[in-house]
Image (cartoon, rainbow, N blue to C red):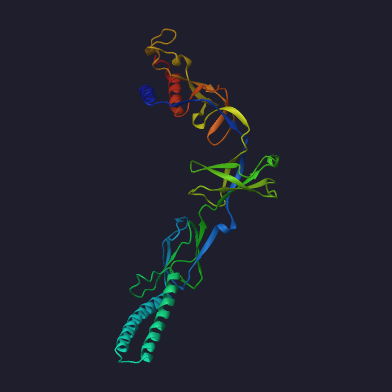
Amino acid sequence: MSKLLLLITLTLTLFAVEIPTKHATQRAFGKSVELNAQIVQLSNASQSIMSLVGGHIEEYYVSVGQSVKKGQKIVLIESIMISNMTANFISQKKQLEAQEKNYQASKSLYDKGMTSMQELNTQSIKKDEVLAKLTSLKSQLNTLGINTETLKEASSNFILYAHSEGVVSEILQALHSSIKEDTHIISVVKSQAFYLKSFLPLEYANKVKIGQKIVINTNAKSIVSNVTQILPNVDENTQRIVLLSSIDEITDNLYVNAYTSATLYFNKTKKYVAVEKSALSFFNNEWVVFVPKKEEQHKEEGHDEHGHDEHEEENESAYELRVINIVTQDEEFVAVEGLELDEQYVSDKSYYVKSQLLKSSLGGHGH
């Protein structure tokens, strides 16, 4: 009974799904070669973020492996230096307000002839001295990322921010440790500083060119890089040519020094009949694509070309498999032998068709 239910379920599922089809096209392909590759970064891709003040590390806002953006909070440091500077800034600001009042009072008296020019100049000099100290403190605090416009009271809190986008690769100082000025706090790997270091057999030395594509697959996603350098010396261990290709798209979960397989695509030079990669299926140890049965394309008004009623074959698949030979491929299409130009094929969801063919081979017509 369970087998019968399975066959019925497969049949109903297949007929409930619209099977997309396309026509085989002619496309230009270049030769491709499989390579071993390593994800690397150039020496200037990593930067250390330093503390501009000494103090005590109170809290980290990030962790190793976390992506950060420019201006994002990194760490909170309690600093006596910041406490003194902000307290001094608040004090100088109040002194400036007092000196401004004294100057205005002296000016009012001078205008009425009740005080001398010397007294007015004395008050002006005192006001300018306080203003100079306040301006200097304001500049220093702004350099440290402290907004003096909103500073209302003294604080020992100093927050360090990220200088650019990247990924935290290492935390260099332990939480609650004391640090000095210019101490390196964390290391950040800049975003989009990843490169692919690929190892090419010597026989392809005259075919590889700057700008050619190298594709890797990671996290079920194809990542395209382009050759930017062909190093002049072969790798001593592999005796292969070393290619560097830049990974330009924003990609998560790329791990430095990890090895991966890659495909180098040479310039397109020859045309083949091609189908989309999604059309390929592995069936009975052979690569196949599924095509509509020819009699299905000629049925009219419920009868096929032999005059049979369509209900007699309702359990049979409307598709048949075609064994093909893969000639070459790129990141989207496969060049094949065994399919004619413009011939219709199942371009996606071929697993539904395979299910029906398996059902037919197991259950036949249900007899």
Residue 196 image point, x, y percent: 58, 48
2 above or below 132? Answer: above
* Quarter of the image with the N terminus in it: top left
Q: Using residue 94 as the reference point, say whether residue 293 is left or right of it.
A: right
116 above or below 172? Answer: below
Residue 7 image point, x, y percent: 39, 22
| Residue 325 seen in the current view | no
Residue 286 image point, x, y percent: 55, 26
122 above or below 151? Answer: below
Q: Residue at x 40, y 10 (%)?
A: 303
Residue 203 image point, x, y percent: 70, 39
Give 127 or 63, whichever is nearer the viewer.
127
* Residue 210 placement: quadrant: top right
Q: Residue at x 32, y 92 (%)?
A: 115
| Residue 329 seen in the current view | yes
Q: Using residue 274 as the reference point, say whether residue 78 is left or right of it.
A: left
246 above or below 367? Answer: below
